[in-house]
Image (cartoon, grey):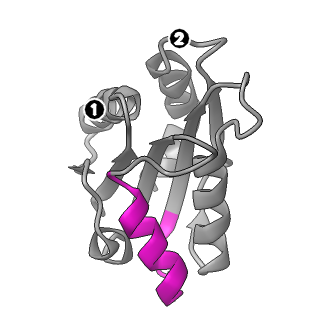
Amino acid sequence: MSTITLITGSTLGGAEYVGDHLAELLEQHGQTVSIVNEATFSDVINSHKLLLITSTHGAGDYPENLAPAMEELAENSPDLSSISYAVIAIGDSSYDTFCGAGIHADTLLKKLGAKPIIQRLDIDIMENPLPEEPAEMWLSKNLAQLCE
């Protein structure tokens, strides 16, 4: 069984709360989870199975704790074909950049050859002020695929 690298991109802590909650649930199902709240380029490229949870900051940007790693990925274009991944994007639908960071991350990972395990989950905090709830429902529905 491989370790799930759970990377969070968070400005106000929402994505970290979601990450901590999902890590706890995954561990209850026998998974080994490595939580990374200050991601580096090597955290991404050295993962085998990646769960990326990010909020969107500003005009569709990554939060400061995730931006450098994602920018380095985009600049260096490494081959990520050995990585399987899933993305949870958290945003506010009252902005035209709704879930922009998560959408960009999903697109970039695919472009670099990583294989999506599950379709990206976009969480609207306007409808779900507690993003842990839709994330938990998503996880329970997709647990088998994520844990393969």
Residue 30 screen position, x and y as percent: 25, 41
**Image x and y of residue 108, in percent:** 62, 69
Left or right: where does residue 101 sit relative to residue 37? right
Given the current orientation, which residue lies at the most extreme front position? 58
The answer to whether residue 85 shows anywhere in this view is yes
Asked if residue 122 is positioned above or below residue 85 in the image, the reply reads above
Query: Would you say 63 lies left or right of 115 here?
Result: left
Q: Is residue 39 magenta?
A: no
Of the pair 25 and 105, the residue shown nearer to us: 105
Q: Residue at x 34, y 36 (%)?
A: 19
Front one among 111 and 125: 125
Residue 3 x %, y %: 27, 59
Q: Amino acid at mark 1?
A: Asp
Q: Which mark is residue 60?
A: none
Residue plotted at (34% across, 50% down): 6
- Circle 1 sits on which residue? 20
Specify which label sits upstream in the sequence, 2 or 1: 1
Q: The magenta stretch spans which residues?
A: 65-84
Q: Which residue is mark 2?
A: 129
Q: Report x, y in % for residue 50.
A: 42, 59
| Residue 49 appears in the figure | no
- 79 in magenta: yes
Residue in view at x 28 percent, y 46 percent: 31
**Closer to the eye: label 2 or 1:** 2
